[in-house]
Image (cartoon, rainbow, N blue to C red):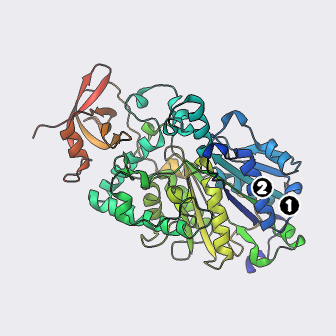
Amino acid sequence: MDGLVNADPERVAVIVGVGQVNDRPHDPADGREPLALMQAALDEADRDAGGGWLRDADSVAVVQQISFRAHNPLARKVAAAIGAHPALAYESVGPNGDSPVLLLNEAANRIARGEGRIAVVVGAETLRTASARAAAAARTDVASQNPLRTLTDAAKPGYRRQYGLSAPVDVYPLYENAARAAWGQTLAEGQRETGELWSRFAAVAARTPAAWLHARRTPEEIVTPGADNRPIAFPYTKLTVANSSVNQGAGFIVTSLAEARRRGVADARIVFVGRGASAHEPEDFLARDRYDASPSMTACLQHALAWNAVDAGTLDLVELYSCFPCVPKMARRVIGWPLDGAATVFGGLTFGGGPIGNYMSHAVAAMVDSLRGGEGTTGLLYANGGYATHNHAIVLATHPLPGAGAPHDFNVQAAADAARGVVPALDKDYAGAATIETYTVFYARGGSAKGGVVVARTPAGQRTLASVPADDLALIAWLTDGVVEPVGQPGEIARAGDVSVWRRAPA
């Protein structure tokens, strides 16, 4: 291990144990709650590491869960459940998709600073059980009781929600449609890329025991709307969005190389933690410079690759976050990852499972298993959270990476901000000529369009929103049939009471 010549093994962070658990009782209401799944996942990680690690953990970090929010915070409860008395027990600020990688990076830095020996990171969601119990209590259908949607619906009303932009599934299509146009793809070409990516995700999930779904899917099945694949928000179907209705837990144990050797962990089972990078977009998705790319994603990925001295040609494995297709599509272009290369080691959030903020704990576990299994020597983990907001990337390897044993500042926000263009002012009351910046159409559970939204630019460059009425069938067809690319097309915004309405420009 030449990379350790000048490194102190007491401060070189490694992963020695990973654990995953799925809970699928016949009656979803009988499922276990998040704390129980977290404990089960860490018990698996402890066995994987050879046993006896959990009670000695000096830090316990938990990915915040939303299935049973009244139970939060859970970090001290997790510590008690595993018999640990850590000096540090905390949970992520929110249930964001980047949380597991952030917590991993923080654990590695504590070890590098000599502030800890054994760190555990864990998370779990049981939305399948939470929804079933809530539906029984309310005597309603399960679909209306998904905690993710009810949490979103409880948010304060405002300008964005007035136009239907409340949940991530409403917002990510704005990136999908803007990016497709910027890349010069037709709708058919963009959908073909989605289908091919997601078909490979399904294939990986099919051979991954810990994944939630194991059925292979063709590209055509994935992107074609139908009775079992209803449209959600254009151009996304059910088979292209995160599957949050799961009961899944995953966790891992991070320690120093020296501690791993003292406890007899074989070198072949030790996975080294490289340097990570983190950057974020503005929390307000209408206060961003563009929707065809993400400066924070780019800065995060580029710095992670550079700091670990890897690129697409030397990476063997990647996990590109896949809550919605636009994310791995943009990420693979940043790093130069080929379309025919699998962009996951776990199966993606549709097929592997989408346990809200904890998906990447499963990806960490799967990456460790893949590296141990000889599928490669180096792997990139890229996480995304919020509304294409939070980004964190890190590299794992079977060998020490540059900077092993030294703490580092993973925040690259300054680089992201420097690359960001001018953010257009928001005009909430505009009426007149405008141009489509991006758009989407929303669908009811039965498959019929229930309206949509256009993000438009005024002649002065300001940004504004306009609704697409559900009864304007001609406009909805024009936005979705792929005959003409709507992005960049002119139109008219008219005020109708408290909202703005989009109309096509006269022919």
User: Is residue 254 in sight in this rendering?
Assistant: no
Q: Amino acid at mark 1?
A: Trp
Nearest the viewer among 449 and 373 is 449
Q: Disc 1 vs disc 2: Cβ atoms closer than 8 Å?
A: yes
Determine the secondary structure under disc 2: strand
> Which residue appears at 49% of the width and 47% of the height?
388
152 horizontally vs 477: left or right? right
Reading the image, the residue beneath label 2 is 120
The single residue placed furthest to the front in the displayed view is 26
Say which quarter of the image contains residue 360. Answer: bottom right
Give me the residue at 26% from left, 48% from top.
Answer: 480
Q: Which residue is at 61% across, 61% downward?
A: 363
Position of residue 379 in the picture relative to residue 200 (left or right) = right
Of the 4 image quadrants, the one containing the N terminus is bottom right
Find disc 1 in the rendering and name its residue: 53
Q: Amino acid at mark 2?
A: Val
